[in-house]
Amino acid sequence: MADSFRLRVMKAISAQIKTVTPAAGFINDLSDYVDEAGRTAERVFRGRDIFSGNEILPFVSILEDFRSQDTLQASSGHTAAAGKWKILIQGFVKDDLDHPTDPAYELCAEVIVALVRAKKDRSNLLGLGNRMPCVTALEIGQPVVRPADGQISDAAFFYLPVTLTVVEDLENPFA
């Protein structure tokens, strides 16, 4: 079975964030890599909010925003709907000894640049086309950068809210 539309969107966002690499002119590297055991390992995760501490820094996790969301708007008798979908992007970095959050500001800025690049083709956001189902807008919110606190994280991190406007067929989420 094919992935649902929303999972395809999350995978497209993951792929876009993975373009943050030194080869693309960035300081950080969020591309997949081969670990010591010879397996492909990722630096961009979807749906993970608990980490073992063994992950290679920097890394990013993409989650749905836990705050309440507007309902999808579908007119009576139709299954097509448009609405806002809020997600959070978290990034974790190795602290700078003198200025612990400086690397988190840098990684956050690079993730923002990668997301803005996905907006360049307004008729094909995230490479998902312009026909239902599709993403018609990608809004980048104000990031929050925090130092390691030993409770939420042992490393400096950022939260970046992103709001997507999605148009989808509620009767066919796999369209």
Image: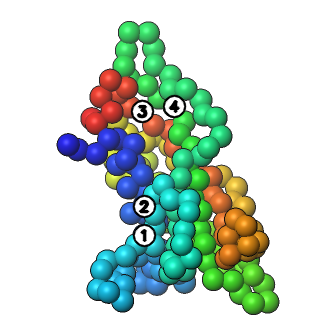
Residue located 46% across and 63% down the image:
45
Residue that numbered label 2 is attached to:
14
Residue that numbered label 3 is attached to:
167
The reply to whether residue 171 is in sight is: yes
**Residue type indicated by callout 4:** Gly
When the figure is inspected, residue 37 is found, relative to residue 60, above or below; the finding is: below
Q: Nearer the viewer, residue 58 or 17?
A: 58
Nearer the observer: mark 4 or 2; the answer is: 2
- Determine crowd level at label 3: few under 14, some 14-19, many 20+ residues with C-alpha closer than 10 A: many
Q: Label 1 to label 3, Cα distance in Å?
A: 25 Å
Counting residues from the N terminus, which is met first, the one under dot 1 or under dot 4?
A: 1
- Secondary structure type for disc 3: strand
- Secondary structure type for disc 4: strand
Counting residues from the N terminus, which is met first, the one under dot 1 or under dot 3?
A: 1
Residue located 30% across and 28% down the image:
172
The reply to whether residue 139 is in sight is: no
